[in-house]
Amino acid sequence: MAMLRNLKLSLLQASRAAGLFRVVRDSRHRTNQLLILCYHGISIDDEHEWAPGLYMSQDDFAARVEAIRRGRYVVLPLGEAVRRLYDGTLPRRSVAITFDDGNFDFYSRAWPVLDRMGVPATVYLTTYYCENNVPIFPLATSYVMWQRPGSRVDLPVGDGRVLPIDTRSPEARKRSHNALLLHTQNEGLSGLEKDALAARLAELLGADYGRLRRNRMLHIMNPGEARELAAAGVDFQLHTHRHRSPLDQHSYAAEIADNRSRVASYTGQTPTHFCYPSGVCMPEFGPWLATEGVVSATTCEPGMARRDSDPFRLPRLLDHSEMTGVEFEAWLAGIGALLPHRPIGFQPVDREGRLIIPDQTPVAAVGVGVSNESGDAQRVSSMESVS
Ligand SMILES: [Zn+2]
């Protein structure tokens, strides 16, 4: 595998040196296509070392924006990019930049870079953890378990019960983390109860949970920060209120409505573009979204958007720490889709929306740490998988 990857990188470097990227970049083929970039987090501290598939250092991110500028790519606001994609009026070398979730680190790390370089961006904002501003439970627990390898502790979970937590290997850590998420779902814990549980876990492991709270690591930005960024020109769009994908139309529409009213109240504008939480995209979701007045939806399937792309299945390139600069430039130029790439590591779900966890029988699904605040026990179809 390593040999193949090295071969691929050498080939790319040779192609770039021979000027191939420049030729493709300016071809008619590339002109009719749009590269939509997808980011999750820009590290406040060492998040990219914990989850390199989701986080990037601020320096690495600045280098990406610099590569975009150097290659004279045209970064369009998402709404304009989608409109011109279907009108057939895209300028040469079109790119759009999107961020999922709306982390506080977008506010404190990504936006300063984008603002300095005059580059527009869209944030698909999930609003539950925006208003309930505590660390995002699945991420925070995964992070503190990663921080304290080699541990084996019993986490008290009430009624004299304990959940064994083992961080002595990545596999054990993953198993423990899954068991923890299932526990919180089965118990129907509220966001605040989960926050207390995460703090207890961190304390047992000897990790500093207070640091996450103080630095607002693994937090969503709050409504005031979203308001401030919207006034500064950041575009905010839809990502569901509770970061979940219910499998019945009524609940799905409620997620959109709950999310839309909040985003509109922060920004003063009605969002009409959507991004599937955790990339979970069932065939029926497109028509449901259209009914709700949504005009486009992006996935996490890598590729270039074309005029014949389904507007409710627009591909995006998830950029992350493990992608080299030359691979990123190949994608910008328009040849990235030709390269072999590994599928992204989102947690698979079955048709019923249940998590598929290897070496465990299918279990009920978990949202991104938001329990049934809405009252109805919705079936949800995904979670952020980052451990
Ligand atoms: Zn998300």
Image (cartoon, helix red, strand yellow):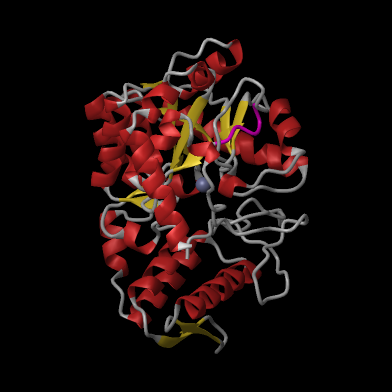
Q: Is residue 94 visible?
A: no
Query: Which residue occupies the foreground of this view, 96 or 195?
Result: 96
Picture quadrant of residue 328: top left
Query: Which residue occupies the foreground of this view, 176 or 378?
Result: 176
Picture quadrant of residue 299: top right
Q: Position of residue 337 (x, y in %)?
A: 53, 37
**313 drawn magenta:** yes
Magenta span dominant secondary structure: loop
Up-down: is 102 above or below 286?
below
The magenta-colored residue range is 311-315
**165 drawn magenta:** no
Up-down: is 321 above or below 208?
above
What's the residue at 44%, 65% (across, down)?
A: 195
What's the residue at 65%, 58% (across, down)?
A: 348
Q: Position of residue 156 (x, y in %)?
A: 49, 84
Q: Position of residue 268 (x, y in %)?
A: 45, 22
Picture quadrant of residue 287: top right
Up-down: is 193 above or below 314?
below
Q: Is residue 276 visible?
A: yes
Query: Which residue occupies the foreground of this view, 90 or 325?
Result: 325
- Left or right? Give the position of 147 relative to 358: left
Q: How many marks?
A: 0
Q: Position of residue 110 (x, y in %)?
A: 30, 39
What's the residue at 55%, 76% (across, down)?
A: 175
What's the residue at 67%, 43% (across, down)?
A: 281
Up-down: is 354 above or below 175?
above
